[in-house]
Image (cartoon, rainbow, N blue to C red):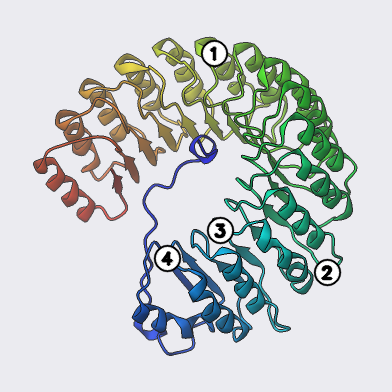
Amino acid sequence: MRSLGWARRWPWSPARRCPLPLTCLGSTPPPGMNLDIHCEQLSDARWTELLPLLQQYEVVRLDDCGLTEEHCKDIGSALRANPSLTELCLRTNELGDAGVHLVLQGLQSPTCKIQKLSLQNCSLTEAGCGVLPSTLRSLPTLRELHLSDNPLGDAGLRLLCEGLLDPQCHLEKLQLEYCRLTAASCEPLASVLRATRALKELTVSNNDIGEAGARVLGQGLADSACQLETLRLENCGLTPANCKDLCGIVASQASLRELDLGSNGLGDAGIAELCPGLLSPASRLKTLWLWECDITASGCRDLCRVLQAKETLKELSLAGNKLGDEGARLLCESLLQPGCQLESLWVKSCSLTAACCQHVSLMLTQNKHLLELQLSSNKLGDSGIQELCQALSQPGTTLRVLCLGDCEVTNSGCSSLASLLLANRSLRELDLSNNCVGDPGVLQLLGSLEQPGCALEQLVLYDTYWTEEVEDRLQALEGSKPGLRVIS
């Protein structure tokens, strides 16, 4: 499972191609215009139409367009003729090593000013990484490099790091998810961390670096002068033993704002080791992702001390941990403390029941900072939903996003939700996906959405089924309220 499934909200709708204005074809585009095409298999005629634009636009994104090595010679030539290019994204195209080489050659022009390059999922292998050192040396303006979903392996990573160590390289963001890295890659990465002050974001998630590799990486960061702001190590085989090193990093790296450790078996013992670093006066962490880390209510108790003490912490994901209702109670009590200013809390699939809703409801009526609450995949049922709706119907609540997917809501529960939509003035997004809701429940929701006073902007109903009659009414609603999106 990819980390994005837990740690961040999934894309609400499939990527769609942004049509090109006819005025842009064959003319010089205004400054700042983007060529942004997604999920379109480009015909020869379409490709011929687009090629002149590759020489003109500042931002070129051709995601999942069926591009292959054959297209890359054209791309390379076009890039050499485009001194305005600042971003190039070719992700999810089977360019292969030879195709990537041709693209990178096109960027090695004295006039090239590219700042962001994404070659994610482009079939780049270890064999194609030999060109990376010279590329990074010749692109001093490059600040972001996305190479995730390419089987670089440890040998390919070593070649990449050779380029990163060049004095002419000033890269700030590097993404290396799913690159088949092992612990052997961590020493080269640690050397980069020690040598560069420019790097601000490092993503190594979904690579099997293990406990030993994470320790080497941590030592490199501890010795580093770089001002790292984001470190992502999700699903990397970390253990509780790594948390002592992580504690030191969090305590000493005042620049660190985001730490992603999801899908690692840290357990309550690991959390206990990590929290002293989070409580350090130097720690300014804003985002902490701990989804599927084998945390229980016991570990939650340690985290609650952090919540109560650190006003800087704004986003916390504990999704996929068996916190239970006791863990939810502890979190809600912490959210009522004046030192807690959390804005986003994910407790999706945390073994919660309707019994926790009295604590959540009390918190929602009094907390003025929390804006997003993800409660999906918990057995709250209609009784729990009714309690939450009563709380959110009180004047002065501030929650903007509420996710209740797969919470065993039925048509009966939609009555409470429909009333909530009319009473609440802050809620903008509501997710009710994968619940036992049919026509009667959807019609109750529609009755509220059709009212001028309903402030909701987005209703998500994945895996919810209704009749053609209801579909017609939904379409009419979206036509009459252009500010509302119903996503299914």
Q: Quadrant of residue 466?
A: top left
Quadrant including the C terminus: top left
* Residue at disc 4, secondary structure: loop
* Residue at disc 2, secondary structure: loop
Residue 329's mark? 1
C-alpha separation, residue under disc 2 versus residue under disc 4: 34 Å
**Vertical relation: 192 (above or below) 342:** below
Marks 2 and 4: CB-CB under 8 Å?
no
Residue 168's mark? 2
**Vertical relation: 229 (above or below) 313:** below
C-alpha separation, residue under disc 1 versus residue under disc 3: 47 Å
Neighbour tally class for label 2: few under 14, some 14-19, many 20 plus, Cα within 10 Å: some
Judged by depth in the image, the label closer to the viewer, 1 or 2, is: 2
**Vertical relation: 48 (above or below) 207:** below
* Residue at disc 1, secondary structure: helix
The amino acid pointed to by label 3 is: Ser
Residue drawn at the location 41% of the way across and 38% of the way down: 426
Neighbour tally class for label 3: few under 14, some 14-19, many 20 plus, Cα within 10 Å: many
Residue 86: horizontal and vertical position, in percent?
62, 73
Mark nearer the N terminus (1 vs 3): 3
Residue drawn at the location 39% of the way across and 40% of the way down: 429
Which residue lies under the disc numbered 4?
66
Residue 83: horizontal and vertical position, in percent?
64, 83
The amino acid pointed to by label 2 is: Gln
Residue 487: horizontal and vertical position, in percent?
30, 45
Can residue 455 be seen at all in this image of the molecule?
A: no
Mark nearer the N terminus (1 vs 4): 4
C-alpha separation, residue under disc 3 versus residue under disc 2: 27 Å
